[in-house]
Image: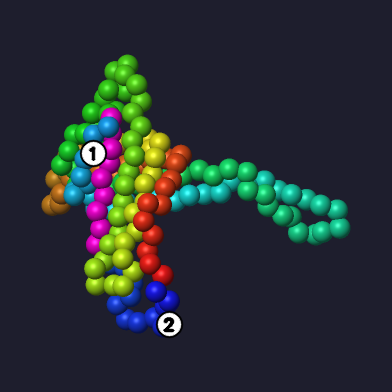
Amino acid sequence: MAQTEWRQGDSINAKEGKAFVTVGGRNYDLFYAIKIESKITKNKEDEKVVGKRSVGKKTTSWSGSGTLTVHAVTSLFKQMFVDYANGGTDQYFSLQLTNEDLSTKWGRETKVLTGCNFDEIDFANLDSDDGVLEQELPFTFDGVELLEKFSS
């Protein structure tokens, strides 16, 4: 479908979607997710050549990082850290995210991040102020897949 003009309402609603994490071959729905962000960063080396004043850049690799922010209603992620801290193996996981806003004409997009590994976790929290417990979990990843693309 060719886009002829932008119309009000064409933007994808960030709340319309779903995500799940796969740990040890088991899928866990992330219905308690608040926000999921991930970025891919290219690593580049300088390329200098005679007769050119600018410095070129050569992409040599990439790295992935992100943050999973959730309501603190599961011990799954803490258990992963406890297992590692007590002599177990470090656990890697995959994260699948789908954006789908049925009020737009774009359909849906599904991404998978693989080789994910958490960097840190807030292990224990108490707070005398009003509010709910949340966890912000930074992570890295080393693989990506684009399973479904938005129509264009």
Q: Which residues are magenta?
A: 15-24
Q: Quadrant of the N terminus?
A: bottom left
Residue 119: give x, y in percent of width and height.
38, 36
The residue at 27%/32% (across/down) is: 25
Q: Badge 1 is on which residue?
A: 27
Residue found at the very far top of the displayed protein: 87
Residue 47 visible (yes or no): yes
* Amino acid type, callout 2: Thr
Disc 2 versus disc 1: nearer the observer: 2
Q: Earlier in the sequence, mark 2 or mark 1?
A: 2
Give the SS element for disc 1.
strand
**Which of the 4 image quarters holds residue 143?**
top left
Residue 137: give x, y in percent of width and height.
32, 42
* Amino acid type, callout 1: Asn
Residue 119 visible (yes or no): no
Give the distance between the C-alpha atoms of the residues marked 2 and 1, in whole angstroms: 40 Å
